[in-house]
Image: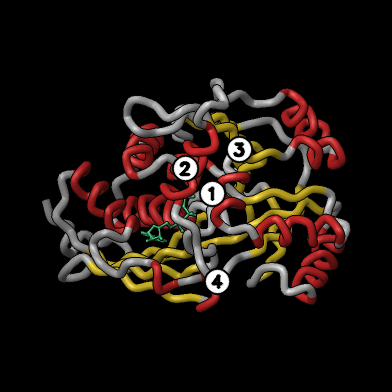
Amino acid sequence: MSLADGGGPAWVRASAPAKINLHLGVGPVRYDGFHPLATVYQAVGLLDEVTVAPAADWTVTVAGDERLALSDVPEDGTNIAVRAARLLAEHAGLDEPVSVRIDKGIPVAGGMAGGSADAAATLVACDALWQLGTPREELMLLAAELGSDVPFALVGGTAVGTGRGEVVVPAMVRGDYWWVVTGAAQGLSTPQVYGEFDVIAEGLGVGEPEIPDELMEALRAHDLEKLALSLHNDLEPAAIRLRPELSDVLATGIDETALGALVSGSGPSCLFLCSGREHAHQVAQSLRLAKAGDPVTVARGPVPGARVERFG
Ligand code: ATP
């Protein structure tokens, strides 16, 4: 099928947010090589933008702040944004190559699911470009096929994730949460962090992961002190074993009055819970002065999932 001269938009730009895990519970590795997860996701205001336009061939270019480790993002068919576009085209029975331009705002390989955000943004952008109106449930299935964190990047907000993270149920949450996010010059490989987790877990008898009640209560009540005490990441010891300096970054944030601190997903980004916008900017500035992480950014959550921003 071809859409040539069909009167659709010439290009579509969509955005998608980074995710953080307020709780990341990891179970013993499954028969299929995945780990069962029980996680609480929150989408925060660090965004990638993806612009798609019809082209002679499938191409991808990446732009953004060099401190986000852009050189680690492949500019060929292995880029998850291209894979997302081709998967949707195949699903719709189309043969319509697009050029994909990614403007990165999310640290690469930072444990914030930047690639997943690009995949989700590409799905909604191509759906609009090709005027498909794909039902939400079908987009969610395609998203899960692309990666465990892609469905949440479509949904956004705050949500509970189970399975390998792809089964996403929105959660009841009151108010806004202010975070400081620190990046690192070099990303961490997610499979390597899980490998280290397996080494640590061996012999410890790790059980099935669960969502702690206290965390959900804290989110329903917007109780920041309780939330700070409930933040937890089972991958944190593994990330710190691979990057020992992360424990200094976390300690510095707490010394600089952050309410709570944890490694983001598989790291090396770190997250610091603050009491509000002003406090977050103050903690961010202190972390910059202490040279704890680079770049140091303030982000508010929850924010919506992938959505079309503009078209022309
Ligand atoms: P996760 O926690 O979901 O595993 P992450 O946030 O640690 O991911 P990503 O930024 O998603 O890491 O990137 C992981 C790897 O995926 C990169 O090192 C890169 O090689 C590859 N990759 C493929 N496509 C993209 C993309 N569009 N953006 C970023 N990385 C990509």
For the question of whether residue 74 can be seen, the reply is yes
- Quadrant position of ligand 1: bottom left
Q: Secondary structure at mark 4?
A: loop
- Residue in the image at 67% along x and 68% along y: 293
Q: Does 148 sit above or below residue 220?
A: below
Q: CA distance from mark 2 to mark 3?
A: 10 Å
Q: Is residue 283 left or right of residue 237?
A: right
> Disc 1, ligand 1: is the CB inside 8 Å?
yes
Q: Which amino acid type is marked by label 1?
A: Ser
At label 3, which amino acid type do we have? Asp
Q: How many neighbours does mark 2 have within 10 angstroms: few (below 14), some (14-19), or many (20 or more)?
A: some
Upstream in sequence: badge 2 or badge 1:
2
- Please tell me which residue lies in front, 2 or 119: 119
Q: Is residue 42 above or below residue 267?
A: above
Q: CA distance from mark 4 to mark 3?
A: 23 Å
Q: Amino acid at mark 2?
A: Tyr
Q: Which residue is mark 1?
A: 266
Residue at mark 1 to residue at mark 3: CA–CA distance:
9 Å
* Distance from the alpha carbon under mark 4 to that under mark 1: 15 Å
Residue 235: % across, % down: 57, 42
Residue 213: numbered disc? none
Pointer 3 residue: 234
